[in-house]
Image: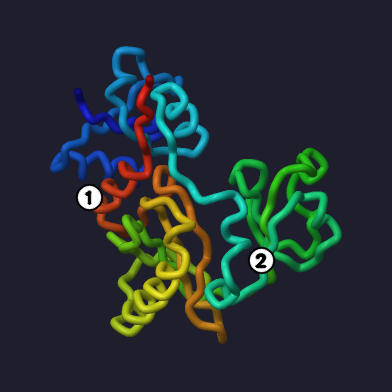
Amino acid sequence: MKNIIALSPMYTEDSNNLKKASLNSPYELSRFNAKWNVPEEFRADVIGVYGEDIYAEIVAEQCNLTLAKPDDDWLSKISEEFTKRKISYGKLKDFVHKENIFIKCSDFKSFKAGVFDKVTNIKGFDTLDLESAVFISEVVEWELEVRCFVLNSKIETYSSYWRNDAFDTNPLSEMEEKDMFEFFNNFIKQYSETLPKAIVLDFGIIKEKGWALIEANPAWCSGLYACDAEKALEVVVKSCAKNIKL
């Protein structure tokens, strides 16, 4: 039996880097075709997937995979000790009268997350399902944002991706790295049982508030930025589980 990881037919820098990383691994990363269909003869050998969330979910159904992800309302249950901001979860209809908030759809598909002075100013608002689940939070200023691929409560690889309102994957300073790991260790001691063993966690620095949790994302659809692709690949694989047919 082969250990195949299905790659999205959409070529990206991340998927190309994972493909290269797989050359020194026990995994075979394969792009099948542009129709998002894994041929029947390969489905039993597919143990994981990486790509856009919709693609990954379609392949998971075809290949009998369970994809690890946090509970939809997970972020709203985290203490402000770690979020440094108020976060609420509910249906879009519950927040239509809110002003000057950050809002994000929990399924990542309905609209682009962002800060809105009025919820009704979301592009295409009139076409949105008011029953869809969303997060809202107070608006804060992020000075730094960092992506971490986490396996068994340990950061396997990480990369900055945003600093002072600009894309930035340069290394953290020694002090930033020390403070981030200290923050992560305190956080994971309290919340590891609420997360899958393989997950992506984003942390950052909020102006005048310090280190904070940004969000959790599934490893099987998260961007790598400047993370070590070999280490990230292992987290991606472990975020997918092959279901045993009885």
Looking at the rendered structure, the kind of residue marked 2 is Ile
* Distance in Å between CA atoms under marks 2 and 1: 34 Å
| Residue that appears at 35% across and 75% down | 181
Q: Nearer the viewer, residue 175 or 20?
A: 175
Q: Position of residue 149 (x, y in %)?
A: 35, 57
* Residue pointed to by mark 1: 230
Dot 1 surroundings within 10 Å: few (below 14), some, or many (20 or more)? many
Name the secondary structure under disc 1: helix
Looking at the rendered structure, the kind of residue marked 1 is Glu
Q: Quadrant of the N terminus?
A: top left
Q: Quadrant of residue 121?
A: bottom right
Q: Is residue 8 above or below residue 245?
A: below
Could you tell whether 125 is left or right of 209 in the image?
right
* Residue pointed to by mark 2: 87
Q: Position of residue 37 (x, y in %)?
A: 42, 19
Q: Residue furthest left?
A: 24
Q: Nearer the viewer, residue 77 or 55?
A: 77
